[in-house]
């Protein structure tokens, strides 16, 4: 009876926690598709055609909607994350949208427009334009602060992180980082902004209040030429104690202790990992590997790559719905 009771309790737990399955969305830049992947079974559920050259994606705070940058079509595609259907498009995104972020209320989307040096702000509900902010050349990264007061945008050719006041929609600080910055991401406590530099091969850790660089991280991988170490995506564990940085053509994910800024591990994954996200309970990390056309699943506890899953051609972005 005890054994049966234990089994019934386990079944009840899984029924009560259906969100543990999770759904990953991977943008395939060359195929013009989104691969929909079950993070529990690791099976592809559906492949959804979207606009040309899909790259950056962001989920609404309620996880019901996925916003997809279709760069070569100069628009955002809007997907229902339950039906996996494209329900609308926003052609107000500005030219060549690349990365984007959304405020925590789900009202406004902040979009990096690579071709015209602008950040475009639109309504998540109907795509109407709230404003445009001029920044540096070739914007890419975009990160809304935890308190929704600041959005940080990076500009690749200007090598800067721009701090934009959300209320006034003005640039309040410009921080010079390393060459060709890609991604900006706030730490969970909002005290730091980490900015990756693809050509510089570094990560700049910026004090979010002082808006000054407090640490610059470098990476040394035996047997890998320095120019192949190209930091791209960043993810933090929920407690903020560890950071995972995709190192591009070095084909590794660096695991960093955020208290000491020391590299704890270098995990070999597919070719040219770019963006990443955690599964629902943060026990696995999924990486989109652009040149091997697959996704690597990493076990967070052991820091080991467990499985490779084929997706579309040139996978770029990856986000997971709990």
Image (tube, grey):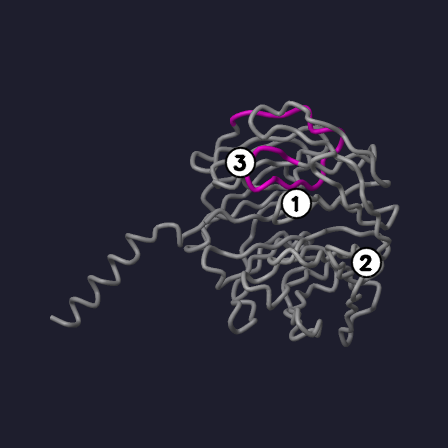
Residue 97 position, x and y percent, is 72, 35
- SS for dot 2: strand
Q: Residues within 10 Å of mark 1 (few under 14, many from 20)?
A: many
Figure check: 308 above or below 52: below
Count of number-bearing discs = 3
- SS for dot 3: strand
Residue 44 position, x and y percent, is 47, 47
Q: Is residue 35 left or right of residue 54?
A: left
- SS for dot 1: strand
Nearer-the-camera pick, 235 or 285: 235
Figure check: 114 above or below 174: above
Residue behind mark 2: 212
Give the image quarter of residue 285.
Answer: bottom right
Q: Mark 1 vs mark 2: which is more N-terminal?
A: 1
- The stretch in magenta equals 87-109
Residue positioned 47% across, 40% down in the render: 62
Residue behind mark 1: 144
As for residue 202 lying within the magenta part, the answer is: no
């Amino acid at each position: 009876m005890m054994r049966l009771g234990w089994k019934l309790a386990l079944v009840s737990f899984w029924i009560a926690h259906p969100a543990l399955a999770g759904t990953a969305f991977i943008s395939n830049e060359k195929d013009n598709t989104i691969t929909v992947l079950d993070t529990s079974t690791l099976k592809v559920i559906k492949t959804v055609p979207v606009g040309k050259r899909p790259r950056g994606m962001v989920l609404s705070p309620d996880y019901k909607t996925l916003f997809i940058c279709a760069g070569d079509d100069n628009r955002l595609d809007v997907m229902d994350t339950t039906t996996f259907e494209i329900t609308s498009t926003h052609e107000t995104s500005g030219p060549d949208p690349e990365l984007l972020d959304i405020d925590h209320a789900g009202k406004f989307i902040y979009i990096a427009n690579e071709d015209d040096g602008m950040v475009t702000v639109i309504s998540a509900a109907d795509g109407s334009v709230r404003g445009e902010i001029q920044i540096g050349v070739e914007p890419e990264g975009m990160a809304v602060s935890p308190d929704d007061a600041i959005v940080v945008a990076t500009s690749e050719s200007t090598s800067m992180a721009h701090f934009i006041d959300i209320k006034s929609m003005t640039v309040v600080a410009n921080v010079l980082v390393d060459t060709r910055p890609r991604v900006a991401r706030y730490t969970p406590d909002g005290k730091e902004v980490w900015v990756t530099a693809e050509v510089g091969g570094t990560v700049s850790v910026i004090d979010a209040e002082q808006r000054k660089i407090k640490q610059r991280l470098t990476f040394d991988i035996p047997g890998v030429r320095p120019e192949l170490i190209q930091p791209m995506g960043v993810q933090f564990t929920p407690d903020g104690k560890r950071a995972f940085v995709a190192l591009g053509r070095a084909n590794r994910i660096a695991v960093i202790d955020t208290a000491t800024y020391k590299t704890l591990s270098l995990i070999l994954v597919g070719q040219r990992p770019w963006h990443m996200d955690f599964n629902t309970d943060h026990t696995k990390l999924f990486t989109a590997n652009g040149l091997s056309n697959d996704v690597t699943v990493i076990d967070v506890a052991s820091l080991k790559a467990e499985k490779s899953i084929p997706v579309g051609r040139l996978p770029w972005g990856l986000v997971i719905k709990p």
